[in-house]
Amino acid sequence: MRPPHAVVIGAGIGGLTAGAALHHRGWRVTVLERSAAPGRTGAGIALAPNAQRALDTFGAGDAVRALAGWQSDGGLRLPGGRWVSRTSSEAAARRFGGPVVVAHRGDVTALLTARLPDGALRTGVRAELADEGGPERPALVRTPDGAFEADLVVAADGIRSATRAALFPGHPEPAYFGCTTWRLVVPRPDRPFPAHETWGRGRLWGTVPLHDGRVYAYAQANAPADGRSEDGELAELRRLFGTWHHPVPAILAAADPTAILRTDLRTTTVPLPTFHRGRVALLGDAAHAMTPHLGQGGCQAVEDAVVLAGLLAEAGGDPAAALPAYTRARLPRTMDVVRRAARIGRLTTVSSPLACAVRTAALVAADKLGPRVALRSLDGVADWRPAAVG
């Protein structure tokens, strides 16, 4: 018999994981990506132990672990350099079964793409859902070059998902969180530094070494939505962060102004009623956009994909049985992570001097109790394990 066919819309981390996981389970997969060169752009991505264990289900976990660059302690600082909280990578590994891997998004994209069958990924293709399908008819995905019939459509088309809008017209889109972010990758400065995240008044900076000698840096600042700097984003970063502690000035000095990514933060405030309709499953940002403050956006997309593939295997490939179970498994968990990330995110947007002083005092007090206190925000998240499916 011909294997069932899945069409994945979007070749981000979640879409590629879905394609690879379904291929591993015996599905014929087609992954459609509107970008002509996916993976060429982007910066860093954090993959916590929960995502690594999900990737283990089709043999990609160890390849991700090999991308780990940060293997030392780090923590939380103030703009002048004072440490207010320390985090031990060993404590994180003991608590959650492994360290958080921070890697370049392009490296992760490449290793997932390598786990797709030849010809499965089609780039430079705009795809739209034409028919969600039903018990007696396949779903239909239309492209400029023709249409694809599918036993299953996986919508991994991002925070502004056109598929979500087609399935749930009128449902509120993810809301602006009140701040914007910048991401960049530069060569590692000569002067060493520990990994860190630094909180200022309505501003945040983070720096993490990558495995290949480069550094991933990210920044956040309270700002109106859809803003852009008239003299360029590098100039804006220098105004906001140029006087902060090492290595921030060195990273800004090494930055390529054309390679800085600026993105407004948005988060789901009104959950979808379901993550599926007909033969279509939504995953990742298309289903549950979240702020990056737990480092779980990509991780939850990976979980979605692996859980979906596992449930389809349990159901003998029948979407009618598997997709309701997918919603039951994923909607409560992912919305809990959305809310947890937003709670931490609101702390980072504090801007009044008094509120920042209170925040610092609380962080210092928590630090006296050891790294385990700082890690509690990931309890029940980073320790997740996929169900065993035969």
Image (spheres, rainbow, N blue to C red):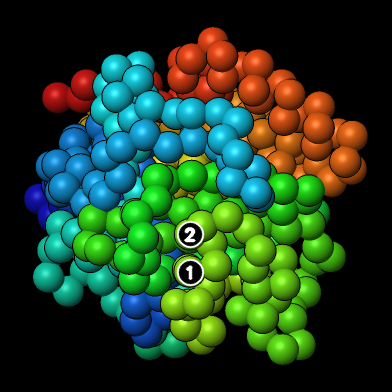
The foreground one among 167 and 112 is 112
Q: Residues within 10 Å of mark 2 (few under 14, many from 20)?
A: many
Q: Do we see residue 357 in this rendering?
A: yes
Residue 173: where, in percent of width, then height?
73, 55
Residue 178: where, in percent of width, then height?
80, 54
Element type where label 1 sits in the image: helix
Quarter of the image that includes the C terminus: top left
Name which residue lies at 76% across and 87% down. Answer: 230
Q: Do we see residue 321 in this rendering?
A: no
Q: Is residue 248 left or right of residue 101?
A: right
Q: Quadrant of residue 332?
A: top right
Q: Is residue 364 left or right of residue 283?
A: right
Element type where label 2 sits in the image: loop
Q: Quadrant of residue 213?
A: bottom left
Residue 130: where, in percent of width, then height?
53, 68
Amino acid type at image mark 1: Ala
Residue 329: where, in percent of width, then height?
47, 25
- Residue 21 tag number: none
Amino acid type at image mark 2: Pro
The CA span between labels 1 and 2 is: 5 Å
Query: Which residue, given by chain and number where applicable, does mark 2 sit on?
Result: 247
Name which residue lies at 44% across and 87% down. Answer: 144
Q: Is residue 37 positioned above or below 378 on the image? A: below
The foreground one among 289 and 210 is 210
Q: Looking at the image, do the residues carrying marks 1 and 2 touch, with CB atoms under 8 Å apart?
A: yes
Name which residue lies at 35% across and 49% down. Answer: 102
Name which residue lies at 72% across and 66% down. Answer: 240
Q: Is residue 375 positioned above or below 263 on the image? A: above
Query: Which residue, given by chain and number where applicable, does mark 1 sit on?
Result: 250
Q: Is residue 326 left or right of residue 377?
A: left
